[in-house]
Amino acid sequence: MNALLRILAWTLALVLVALPVVAVLSGWIAGDRWPMRSLAVTGEFRQVDQAQVREAVLPLVQQGFFAVDLGQVRDAVSRLDWVAQVEVRKRWPDRLEVSLAEHTPVARWSDGRMLSEDGKLFAAPAGAGAGLPLFEGAQAQAGELMAFHSLARPLFLPLGLKVDTVTLSARGSWSLLLDDGTRIEAGRGDPQPRLARFARMLPKIRAADPRLLVRADLRYTNGFTLVWQDPSAPPATPPVSAPQAHT
């Protein structure tokens, strides 16, 4: 019995010692004795508004220095649009530091999200990313779509054309849409030789016929077919010594 009483006495003593510490750390008491007086927010802020960051953080620092949960602050800032990474630190006695990095978008995604330069999809406000290309394909193929766009873009820029849309079908067939409305079917496998050959010939094709080129099918071994905007135009140009292609 004496041993049990000693154990209970020690337990009670430990609780009485620990309870004030827990109360302070949780902000239950004495929060006004160690208030957070300074909030430092750093980052490039191309898209994120500092005022939004402060608005997200301030409700979480009202219980004093010890009660600030850095994980909660990090999560609150991470939920803001365009935020890619967040670091949060407390500096004694009254300073909270928040450092963030933004996503750098390289393309719009077909489901309304955006693709960052490091290959991550992220949510963005509606209408964001105007002027960026649109990627269509499976999420797991984001890296392939980025690589294809990097390959195709410099082929058409010298011609004053931009790649507006890049599509990779479920069967692995590539197509792209230029900003003048021309859709190019590049087919499967390695499209680079076919695209390069077409880009070299495109100035001559445009000079020979001023009508808008609606579609170019490059899925042939030695040539391609062309479709013009004018419905009264002759049938599509047959490929040179090439069998019918399949997607």
Image: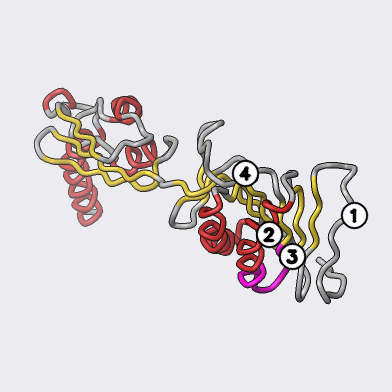
**Inter-mark Cα distance, 2 to 1:** 27 Å
Q: Which mark is residue 32?
A: none
* Image quarter of residue 86: top left
- Looking at the rendered image, the disc whose residue lies closer to the viewer, 4 or 1, is 1
Q: Which residue is mark 3?
A: 218
Q: Position of residue 226 (x, y in %)?
A: 79, 57
Q: Which residue is mark 4?
A: 179
Q: Callout 3: few (<14), some (14-19), or many (20+) C-alpha neighbours within 10 Å? A: many
Task: Name the amino acid, label 2.
Answer: Leu
Residue at far front of view? 208
Residue lying at 18% horizontally and 41% vertically, measured from the top left:
90
Tell which circle, 2 or 1, labels the residue nearer the N-terminal end: 2
Q: Quadrant location of the N terminus? A: bottom left
Task: Name the amino acid, label 3.
Answer: Leu
Q: Nearer the viewer, residue 147 or 194?
A: 194
**Inter-mark Cα distance, 3 to 4:** 18 Å
Q: Callout 4: few (<14), some (14-19), or many (20+) C-alpha neighbours within 10 Å? A: some
Element type at mark 3? loop
Residue lying at 86% horizontally and 75% vertically, measured from the top left:
243
